[in-house]
Amino acid sequence: MGKTSKDKRDIYYRLAKEEGWRARSAFKLLQIDEVFHVLKGVTRAVDLCSAPGSWSQVLSKRLYQNKKEGEDVKIIAVDLQAMAPLPGVTQLQGDITKLSTANAIISHFDDQKAQLVICDGAPDVTGLHDIDEYIQSQLLLAALSITNHVLMPGGNFVAKIFRGKDTNLLYSHLRIFFEKVSIAKPASSRNSSIEAFVVCQNYSPPEGYVPQMINPMIDDVMLVTKESPEINKLLIPFVVCGDLRGFDSDMSYKLNLMDDCEYSYKEVVQKPIAPAYKDILDKIKNCSIKHSAITVDHSDDVNKEQV
Ligand code: SAM
């Protein structure tokens, strides 16, 4: 294939080179911003899964333009892979699903929290949609956990998602933390790709919510409830019902439950009329009839091979 064929097939790839962006992805963030104005007035931002760095380039360009006199700009860029340096951008190399990376990011923010977190993270796509979608959702949830630690109330969060059957679940989860959640498909994102972006605006976590590095979709719910304030439990209601002083369904009890009351066997109120195991019961019944017939024969010393 000729050197220029990709330039012909992919206009955004070509424009990225012409305009000095490290990747065509720059246009996705720029186009999201055209509609949602997520970069407006921002001076502190985190770029998760940032390599090779075109979103960080967009941040760097815009944030330094936004800055008023005396104001500082803070841009933290994080990726598994090393990224060539960018002026005005602090880089961290690490896995965003790991607590150590999250802590390293969090340590850059104290009372001056970020106004924007963006995440363009994508796993190495396997081509198996279910797996790709699952891994992508794990990246998004890791990004949200970090966001819960570093984003200021009123801030915005933009992250890549793969549209699939769990999109509504993710959407509902994000809605707990943000007043408005939209799904954006920038023109520069190929129609053939299941990629889209959640644009979450006006960070407003539930009152009393304490940020935790957990993944509500896979982490042990009991672990969450043990260490969390009440409000955190609302994220995944796990409600134990009934009087806990009563019977334990995993225990065996003697037949005579109360000393002054004799046990008497009762038939079940209504037997299943067509249980799935009916066939096998019938077979066992026939077999035992045959078996008892054979037993009789056997007692009379008939051919044992029939038994
Ligand atoms: N936004 C970037 C840009 O504009 O140049 C492009 C990001 S690229 C599509 C996806 C990035 O996600 C890759 O660089 C990859 O290393 C990163 N990534 C995937 N999983 C990650 C993880 N668990 N932690 C950190 N980075 C991750």
Image (cartoon, rainbow, N blue to C red):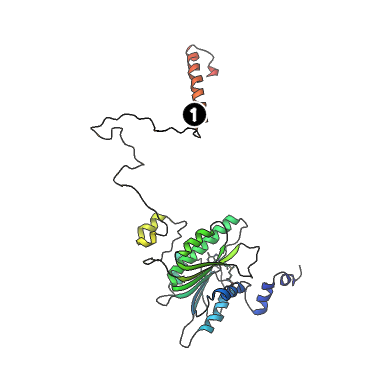
Q: In the displayed image of the protein, which residue is found farthest to the right?
A: 2
Residue 84 seen in the current view: no
Residue 203, quarter of picture: bottom left
Q: Residues within 10 Å of mark 1 (few under 14, many from 20)?
A: few
Could you tell me which residue is drawn at 51 percent across and 23 percent down? 286
Q: Amino acid at mark 1?
A: Leu
Q: Position of residue 69 (x, y in %)?
A: 47, 88
What secondary structure is found at the residue carrying circle 1?
helix
Where is 39 relative to 180, above or below? Answer: below
Q: Is residue 187 left or right of residue 59?
A: right
Residue ID at (49%, 75%): 45
Asked whether, in this view, residue 98 is left or right of residue 249, the answer is right
Q: Quadrant of the N terminus?
A: bottom right
- At x 39%, y 61%, the residue is 232
Looking at the image, which is closer to me, 269 or 168? 269
**Residue 179 pos. (x, y %):** 46, 68
Quadrant position of ligand 1: bottom right
Residue 183 visible from this viewpoint: yes
- Number of marks in picture: 1
Task: Give the residue at mark 1.
Answer: 281
Q: Where does the image place residue 124, in percent across and percent down from the top left?
A: 59, 62
Q: Position of residue 265 (x, y in %)?
A: 34, 29
User: Is 223 above or below relative to 267?
Assistant: below
